């Protein structure tokens, strides 16, 4: 829960972050990639990374793993690779 006075506050009408120095990796799964990228324009990833986490001062990296309706070994491998890349980016 990113609430006022925990994650952010306002001073003179401007938002100030309270969670600077933190990092997060966001994974979106399930839908075909063509749908999430071209129809939804990665809206759920942007909403979480930019509009929520960054607003609170958290450095975030989001990515999508398509068609991950079943967690197969192949999907686990994709996720592990993406998370490693994201953690390298965030460090």
Image: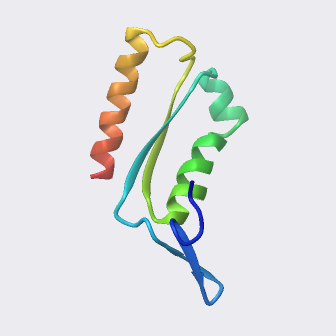
Extreme residue toward the bottom, this view: 12
Q: Nearer the viewer, residue 76 or 41?
A: 76
Which residue occupies 68% across, 27% down? 35
Q: Is residue 10 left or right of residue 61?
A: right
**Residue 48, position as x, y percentages in the image:** 57, 49
Vertical position of residue 84 compared to residue 9: above or below: above
Q: Nearer the viewer, residue 89 or 21?
A: 21
Vertical position of residue 68 compared to residue 16: above or below: above
Which residue occupies 66% across, 43% down? 43
Quarter of the view holding residue 28: top right
Extreme residue toward the right, this view: 39
Q: Nearer the viewer, residue 62 or 6?
A: 6
Q: How many marks?
A: 0
Q: Is residue 38 left or right of residue 48?
A: right
Quadrant for the N terminus in the image? bottom right
**Residue 54, position as x, y percentages in the image:** 51, 60
**Residue 64, position as x, y percentages in the image:** 52, 31
Q: How is the image coloured?
A: rainbow
Q: Is residue 86 left or right of residue 40?
A: left
Vertical position of residue 35 compared to residue 62: above or below: above
Quarter of the view holding residue 66: top right
Which residue occupies 56% across, 58% down? 2
**Residue 70, position as x, y percentages in the image:** 53, 11
Which residue occupies 64% across, 25% down? 34
């Amino acid at each position: 829960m990113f609430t006022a006075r925990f994650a952010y506050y306002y001073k003179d009408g401007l938002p100030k972050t309270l969670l600077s120095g933190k990092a997060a990796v966001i994974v979106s799964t399930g839908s075909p990639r063509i749908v999430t990228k071209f129809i939804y324009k990665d809206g759920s990833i942007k909403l979480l990374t930019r509009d929520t986490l960054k607003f609170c001062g958290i450095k975030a990296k989001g990515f999508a793993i398509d068609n991950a309706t079943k967690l197969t070994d192949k999907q686990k491998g994709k996720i592990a690779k993406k998370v490693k890349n994201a953690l390298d980016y965030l460090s």
